[in-house]
Image (cartoon, rainbow, N blue to C red):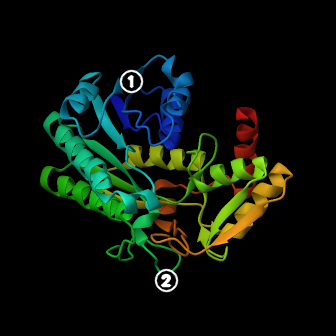
């Protein structure tokens, strides 16, 4: 059994995945550049437990750098690349679309080319529910049209899927594209809503709430996402697209109220107009993942929030 290369392995989802793969007895190589989009010290702490495990290797470098990618692939005989590294965030992508295209597309091509040269057979691409755009039809199915993205970030994720399909078609690479739906849990990025709102509620600060609070997100607990990634990596054969979502949307107002209850604090709301690039709802149809991967979310929103808040309180 070969090693698994995880790009972005020091991040929120990536670090949980790395720990899971190590527990499963896999050798793991992480490629991460510790980008300062948020504090690099947080990412280094994410890898603290994994870094002492047998079978773990870290290569610090950018996915756009062919030498860094080659070094990562040369660290161990890699048979699977799980590509999670990306410039993340819908709203920041509107301010700097060129950077998102550079990291998310140039980086993905660099990885795919390296996998082609080194005959790495399996490539798992971390995509996003944002590819569905502001879809009127719910729940979102993998067969729905995804040609109307509403942010540069979403456009780069869809383009990444198309690039991955091209390499499957031309070179026979086994590829899975996983569309993640609003992942949350311990180690969540500090800029994401649940984490950012929890900090503000605890500090007694007002929450910037964009829109009327009825927008919905299909929150998915990180352990469920990791389980889906592992199963997809094991079962990738040709080319696949799978939704990984909670399949139970929660409105923005409901999410805030749940955090406030869990923190035993009042949430002070600062209502603001909707933001460009935001969508009204996300909602995953997971029938295909249930059928192909025998996967379904196990952690409900209430339990997941309790787990997140337990971690959040320990970090205070």
Quarter of the picture holding the N terminus: top left
Expressed as whole percent of the image width and height from the top left, the position of residue 271 reads 67, 71
From the viewer's perspective, tell me whether residue 287 is left or right of residue 75.
right
Left or right: residue 254 compared with residue 35: right
Residue 62 position (above or below residue 127): above
Of the numbered discs in the image, which one, if any, rests on residue 256? Answer: none
Q: List the single residue furthest toward the bottom.
A: 136
The residue drawn where x is 60% and y is 61% is 246
Task: Kindly identify the residue that appears in the image at 25 percent across and 29 percent down.
Answer: 68
| Residue assigned mark 2 | 136
The answer to which quarter of the image holds residue 37 is top left
Q: Marks 2 and 1, Cα distance to the nearest angstrom?
A: 43 Å
Residue nearest the observer in this picture, 309 or 98: 98
Query: How crowded is the residue under tag 2: few (<14 C-alpha within 10 Å), some, or many (20+)?
Result: few
Q: Where is residue 92 in the image (x, y as percent from the top left)?
A: 43, 57
At 27% from the left edge and 61% from the top edge, which residue is drawn? 159
Q: Which of marks 2 and 1 is nearer the N terminus?
A: 1
Q: Is residue 37 above or below residue 165?
A: above
**Residue 294 visible in the current orientation:** yes
Secondary structure of the residue carrying numbered label 2: loop
Q: Which mark is residue 58?
A: 1
Residue for point 21% across, 45% down: 112
Rendered view: 156 above or below 133 = above
């Amino acid at each position: 059994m070969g090693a698994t290369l995880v790009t972005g392995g020091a991040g929120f989802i990536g670090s949980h995945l790395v720990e899971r793969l190590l527990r499963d007895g896999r050798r793991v190589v992480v490629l991460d550049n510790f980008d300062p989009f948020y504090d690099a010290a947080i990412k280094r702490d994410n890898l603290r437990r994994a870094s002492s495990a047998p079978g773990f290797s870290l290569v610090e470098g950018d996915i756009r750098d062919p030498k860094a990618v080659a070094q990562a692939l040369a660290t161990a005989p890699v048979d699977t690349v799980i590509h999670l590294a990306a410039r993340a965030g819908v709203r920041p992508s509107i301010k700097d679309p060129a950077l998102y295209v550079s990291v998310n597309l140039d980086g993905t091509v660099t990885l795919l080319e390296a996998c082609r040269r080194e005959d790495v057979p399996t490539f798992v691409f971390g995509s996003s529910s944002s590819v569905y755009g502001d879809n009127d039809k719910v729940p979102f199915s993998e067969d729905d049209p995804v040609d109307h993205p509403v942010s540069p970030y979403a456009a780069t994720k869809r383009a990444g899927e198309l690039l991955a399909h091209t390499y499957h078609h031309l070179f026979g690479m086994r590829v899975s594209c996983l569309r993640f739906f609003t992942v949350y849990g311990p180690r969540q990025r500090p800029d994401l809503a649940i984490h950012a709102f929890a900090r503000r509620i605890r500090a007694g600060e007002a929450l910037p709430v964009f829109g009327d609070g009825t927008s919905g997100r299909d929150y998915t607990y990180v352990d469920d996402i990791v389980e889906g990634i592992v199963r997809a990596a094991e079962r990738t054969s040709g080319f696949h697209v799978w939704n990984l979502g909670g399949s139970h949307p929660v409105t923005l107002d409901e999410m805030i109220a749940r955090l406030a209850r869990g923190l035993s604090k009042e949430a002070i709301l600062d209502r603001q107009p909707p933001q460009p690039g935001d969508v009204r709802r996300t909602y995953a149809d997971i029938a295909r993942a249930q059928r192909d991967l025998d996967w379904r979310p196990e952690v409900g929103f209430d339990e997941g929030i309790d787990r997140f808040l337990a971690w959040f309180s320990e970090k205070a």
